[in-house]
Amino acid sequence: MLIDAAARELPQIGLEDALRVLVVMAEKRDPRFPRAAARLAARITTERGLDLAESRYVLALAETLPLQPETIKLALDGYCRRR
């Protein structure tokens, strides 16, 4: 709930912060996780101009985030920071 409240205060959430929120959702087994993971993968794909193969990889990483949050976060973080 604290994350929800803080996120509502921001005009826009950057990719890195959105990933942090998604990691918390994954760790807490939040029922909103699947939709949030899909949205983050779509944002990364769009904002970083990924091709089809990279898009599939990012979506797969987002989907499996609950299995190994810290490890998978590192891989996704590379895409979030990419310019």
Image (spheres, rainbow, N blue to C red):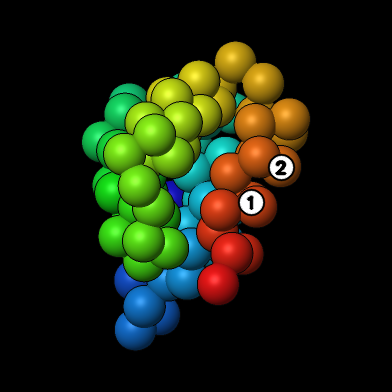
**Relative to residue 67, is residue 9 drawn left or right?**
left
Residue at image position (31%, 29%) is 34
Callout 2 amino acid: Leu
| Residue position for label 2 | 74
* Label pair 2/1, CB-CB below 8 angstroms: yes
The answer to whether residue 41 is above or below residue 31 is below
| Residue position for label 1 | 77
In this orientation, which residue lies closer to the viewer: 55 or 66? 55
Callout 1 amino acid: Asp
User: In this orientation, does residue 63 appear?
Assistant: yes
Q: How many residues crowd around disc 2 within 10 Å: few (fewer than 14), some, or many (20 or more)?
A: few
Residue 46, by quadrant, is bottom left
Locate residue 82, reporting x and y percent.
Answer: 59, 64
The answer to whether residue 41 is above or below residue 47 is above
Residue 63, by quadrant, is top left
Residue at image position (50%, 20%) is 64
